[in-house]
Image: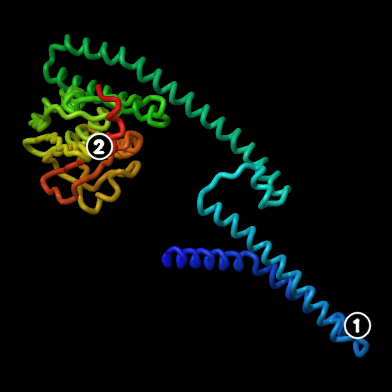
Amino acid sequence: MEKILLKRKKELVIILISYLKEYMLQIIIYILVIVFINVYFIYLCGRNLYMDDLLYLDIILVFLGFALLVISYLRYQQVERIYQRNSFLTSNKLKEYLPKQTIKIIEKNNFYYSNENNYLRGQIQELSDYITKWSHETKLPIASLRLMNERNNDLILKKEMRLVIEQIQLLVNTMLMSSKLRNPENDIKIEKILISQVIKEAIKHHSYFLINDHFTINLKVENEYVYSDRRWLTYMLDQFITNSIKYKSNNPKLTFVVKQNEKKLTLIIEDNGIGISKEDVPYIFDRGFIGHNLRDGDYRSTGMGLYFVKEIAKKLEIRVLIDENFNSGSRFILEFVDNAKYFLLDY
């Protein structure tokens, strides 16, 4: 109880200090007006001035100013508490705290920004629809390139062409999924899925590169399942596998481990690549960040893969961590903590 009262007092003191800082000029002006009235009457009336009357006038002015100050402070206190609670107020409610003229300006600004927001949303949706359409239409030429390359008798050129085609396919898939990431709520379907199936599907997406680079795949997974979105979860694993290929070392290995207890399920993705430097760890999920350990290879890093992973994880309520103490490559940890609320969907 004492802690609550102490916290309450601190809040009031902070609000009072903030109020005095904001209204100090008005308070000083009011005091100067009272001083001016006193000086004026003393100079005007001289000896004929009754000091009792002037004192009585000062008391009235001070009392009136104090009353206005208290009313103004109480209203300021109410508004400050509403702001701290992040409460939303309608225009009718705002009228209790703000002048009508201010309300009109706020409503006019809200109308303008609402129209601007709707326009920008429409533009983004049109762009997203165009990217989706373009990505789907690109599948046919890519498939045609694969068939044409199969008739290629130059084995070296055939291998190089296959590598480029697979890279194009991955880039198209990334562009398609990233465009959907702008508004994924309408594209999320929570269902019961086996972790092993999602892992195998993600591995299949990169099978050409994994085979070409002679990766050893270790699956320490049984029949564990989670409630999540299959496509988005697969896409998250795609990014981890892509990084493992991109930052591979000699005799590359990729390991998937699932651990489960009563509270959560944990998926560990581990490789023996060049790893992530400790100074880069706090920034690897930032948009566009490219680590210092990047080296030349078949890919051009955009720094967007792990950023997408972070954004998708928020939508799917998955906790994504990196093991900073792992020195033999990189180790990412996915924690499915909130799956318990989907248990009613079990079948």
Taking the spot 64% from the left edge, 58% from the top edge, the residue there is 75
Instruction: Give the residue displayed 50% in from the left and 67% down from the top.
Output: 9
**173 to the left or right of 197:** right
Label 2 or label 1, whichever comes before in sequence order: 1
Which residue is situated farthest in the front direction here? 1
| Amino acid type at mark 2 | Phe
Q: Residue at x 22, y 45 (%)?
A: 322
**Residue under label 1:** 44
Question: In the picture provided, is 16 more to the left or to the right than 102?
Answer: left
Q: Position of residue 111 (x, y in %)?
A: 64, 37
- Describe residue 153's horizontal placement relative to residue 179 as left or right: left
Where is residue 210 shown, x and y percent of the image? 13, 28
Q: Nearer the viewer, residue 12 or 140?
A: 12
Q: Position of residue 184 (x, y in %)?
A: 39, 29
Query: Would you name the residue on which mark 2 appears?
Result: 336
The amino acid pointed to by label 1 is Leu
Residue at 62% from the left image edge and 40% from the top image edge: 110
CB atoms of marks 2 and 1 within 8 Å: no
Residue 115 figure quarter: top right
Whole-angstrom CA distance, mark 2 to mark 1, is 82 Å
- Let me know if residue 286 appears in the view: yes
- Secondary structure category for the residue under label 2: strand
Answer few, some or many: residues within 10 Å of disc 2's Cα (few below 14, many 20 plus, some between 14 and 19): many
Circle nearer the viewer, 2 or 1: 2
